[in-house]
C-alpha cells in the first residue's frame, strides 16, 4: 500500500488463489486486514513469473521458515539490477542464518542491491496511514537510498543504516522479549516487570548482536529499542498476544493454532538459544523462555529463577570503563 501510494504499480504474489481473486476483484484482503479497501494499483497473482516479469523492486515478506523456499521460487525470474528488499524478522531454523544470508545464498548476484526493511511498524497502523518510522539497511549506500526513495511517504518515514547485521538481529530478537512481556502480563505481573524485561532484554539483544558483528548503537535505533517498544506494548503484536495466552495457562500448540498467523518469537527463541551458545553470550531471559516454550518449564518458576540469579553489575562496559570508576 505504501508503494502504491508512491505511484508504483504493485503486483503481489500469494500461494492462495482465493486471496488473489479477493484482492483483484474486491480490492480487499479480509483474513489479514479486515475492513480495509486496498488501492486499485495493487493486483495479485499466484504465478511468480507474472509477479516478477517487469519488477524494478521485489519485496519479500515471507515468514523466516519459508524465506528460502520463496526465494528459490523467485530465482528463475530474478534479473541483475532488481532491488531486493526483505521485511522478515527471524533466523532460518536449523542453519541459524540471517535472512539476508539466506537470500544471498540463493541469489548471489543480488548482494549489492539487497536491503532489509525493519522497525516499529504494525501493518494494521501503516494501512491507516498512521505516522510510522522505519529503517532500511543495506551493504550498498546507493541501494539503501534508492529503496528509501521508493518507500518514503509523508506518513512512512524511512531512515538508512549500513548495519545489516544489527538491523536483522534487532528485528528478530525483539520478538523473544515481546513474548516474555506478554507472558508477564498473562501471569498478572506489573509494569515494573515489563520494564525490567524490556531493558534487560535489550541488553541481551545487543550482546548477541555485537558478537555477531553488529554496531551497538543500532540497538538504540528503530530496529532495536523502537521495535522492542512497539512489540512489547501494542495490542497488535502477535508475539505479545501469544505470550499473554501462555501466561494465562494455555498450551503452546493451542496458542499457535488459535493465532492463525506467524508468531516468529517462538522459533526465534530456539535459534537465539543456539546462537548464544555458538557465540558464548549470556542471554538469561532467552534461556528461561526457551525452557518454558520447549521444555515445559512453569513460567512462574522461570520468573523466580531470573530474579534469583547471582547478583551482578548493570553494564559490563560501564563497570570496566576507566573514565567512570568507583570512588576509593
Ligand atoms: N505483520 C506485521 O505488522 C509485520 C510483520 N513483519 C514480519 O513479516 C514476516 C511475515 O509476517 P506476516 O505477513 O505478518 O505473517 P502472517 O502470518 O500474517 O502471513 C504470512 C504469509 O506468508 C504466507 N506463507 C507462509 N508460508 C509460506 C510458504 N512456504 N510459501 C509461500 N507463502 C507462505 C502465508 O500464506 P498462507 O496464508 O497461505 O499460509 C501468509 O500469507 C514475519 O517475519 C514478520 O515478523 C514485519 C513487520 C511488521
Ligand atoms: O514486527 C512487528 C511490528 O514491528 C510485528 O510484530 P508481531 O509479529 O508481534 O505482530
Image (cartoon, helix red, strand yellow):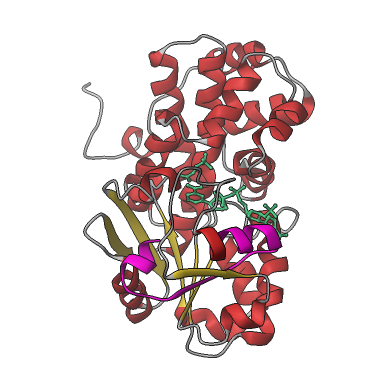
Residue shown at 36% from the left, 62% from the top = 2
Give the image location of residue 33, x and y in percent.
Answer: 50, 46
Front-lying residue, 223 or 202 = 223
Front-lying residue, 306 or 251 = 251
Residue shown at 29% from the left, 73% from the top = 149
Residue 321 appears in the picture as rendered: yes
Q: Which residues are magenta?
A: 1-23
Residue shown at 35% from the left, 58% from the top = 135
Residue 2 sits inside the magenta stretch: yes
Residue 284 appears in the picture as rendered: no
Front-lying residue, 103 or 84 = 84
Give the image location of residue 161, x and y in percent.
Answer: 33, 64
Left or right? Give the position of 269 relative to 126.
right
Residue 270 position (above or below residue 217): above
List the single residue furthest toward the bottom. Answer: 80
Residue shown at 64% from the left, 26% from the top = 288
Amino acid at each position: 500500500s505504501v508503494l502504491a501510494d508512491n505511484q508504483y504499480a504493485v503486483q503481489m504474489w500469494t500461494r492462495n488463489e482465493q486471496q488473489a481473486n479477493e484482492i483483484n476483484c474486491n480490492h480487499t484482503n479480509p483474513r489479514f486486514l479486515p475492513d480495509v479497501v486496498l488501492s486499485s494499483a495493487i493486483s495479485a497473482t499466484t504465478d511468480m513469473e507474472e509477479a516478477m516479469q517487469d519488477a524494478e523492486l521485489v519485496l519479500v515478506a515471507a515468514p523466516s521458515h519459508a524465506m528460502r523456499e520463496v526465494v528459490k521460487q523467485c530465482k528463475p525470474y530474478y534479473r541483475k539490477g532488481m532491488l531486493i528488499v526483505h521485511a522478515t524478522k527471524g533466523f532460518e531454523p536449523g542453519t541459524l542464518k540471517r535472512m539476508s544470508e539466506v537470500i544471498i545464498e540463493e541469489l548471489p548476484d543480488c548482494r549489492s542491491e539487497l536491503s532489509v526493511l525493519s522497525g516499529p511498524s504494525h501493518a494494521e497502523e501503516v494501512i491507516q496511514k498512521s505516522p510510522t518510522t522505519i529503517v532500511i539497511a543495506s551493504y550498498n549506500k546507493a541501494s539503501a537510498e534508492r529503496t528509501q526513495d521508493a518507500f518514503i511517504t509523508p506518513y512512512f518515514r524511512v531512515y538508512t543504516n549500513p548495519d545489516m547485521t544489527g538491523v536483522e538481529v534487532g528485528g528478530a530478537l525483539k520478538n523473544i522479549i515481546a513474548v516474555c512481556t506478554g507472558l508477564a502480563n498473562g501471569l498478572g505481573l506489573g509494569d515494573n516487570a515489563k520494564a525490567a524485561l524490556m531493558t534487560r532484554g535489550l541488553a541481551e539483544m545487543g550482546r548477541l548482536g555485537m558478537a555477531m558483528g553488529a554496531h551497538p548503537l543500532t540497538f538504540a535505533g528503530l530496529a532495536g529499542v523502537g521495535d522492542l517498544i512497539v512489540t512489547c506494548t501494542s495490542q497488535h503484536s502477535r508475539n505479545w498476544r501469544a505470550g499473554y495466552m501462555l501466561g494465562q495457562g494455555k498450551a503452546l500448540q493451542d496458542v499457535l493454532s488459535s493465532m492463525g498467523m506467524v508468531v516468529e518469537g517462538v522459533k526465534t527463541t530456539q535459534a537465539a538459544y543456539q546462537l548464544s551458545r555458538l557465540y558464548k553470550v549470556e542471554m538469561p531471559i532467552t534461556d528461561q523462555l526457551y525452557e518454558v516454550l520447549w521444555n515445559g518449564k512453569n513460567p512462574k518458576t522461570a520468573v523466580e529463577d531470573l530474579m534469583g540469579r547471582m547478583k551482578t553489575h548493570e553494564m559490563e562496559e560501564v563497570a570496566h570503563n576507566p573514565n567512570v570508576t568507583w570512588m576509593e
